[in-house]
Amino acid sequence: MAGPIVRILAQVVVMGVGVFSKALMTAVQRVQADGGRAAAAAATQARTRGVMATAQARQVLNLAEEGELTGEQVLAAFERHFEANNPDKGGSFYLQSKIHNAKEALLDEIGYVEPEPAYEDEEGRAGEGERGEGGEGEGG
């Protein structure tokens, strides 16, 4: 009695595996034909822009996926995550790079221009902008 039942079960399993493998191969072929082009186009567009996608940048900085962003929100998140991943404190330079790229992408997206950092020259005089610019406030 057990013999015919085992034979029937074996036939069902073999047929099921055949149907499943055929469906899997069809799905893989569709993904390769359609999804491969779409993914390649998205990657090419991102490379062409040279900027991280906005959605990815929001994820990297742990910002809400929807809604308006301000430059201050982006910079605050950047400072928090950048410092948390400081390699001197056991963090990752790679993650810091991703965080920096995310900040740049989001600030570019919202059109925010960061103010130039203040600096002190060799004589201790405070100034604005980059060194050697020859901007206002220098002798003349």
Image: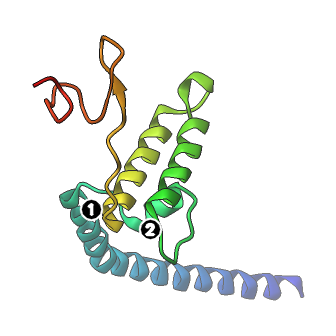
Q: Is residue 66 left or right of residue 41?
A: right
Residue 104, percent from left and from top: 35, 52
Q: Is residue 68 left or right of residue 29?
A: right
Q: Is residue 139 above or below residue 39?
A: above
**Viewer-closest of 115 and 85:** 115
Please name the residue shown 30% across and 18% down the image.
121
Provide the residue designation for mark 1.
46
Please name the residue shown 26% across and 36% down the image.
129
Q: Give the quadrant of residue 130.
A: top left
Q: Label 2's element?
A: helix
Residue 126, percent from left and from top: 35, 25
Q: Amino acid at mark 1?
A: Ala
Residue projecting furthest to the left: 140
**Viewer-closest of 102 and 10:** 102
Residue 19, percent from left and from top: 53, 86
Q: Amino acid at mark 2?
A: Ala
Near mark 1 (Cα within 10 A), the count class, few <14, some 14-19 or many ≥20, is few
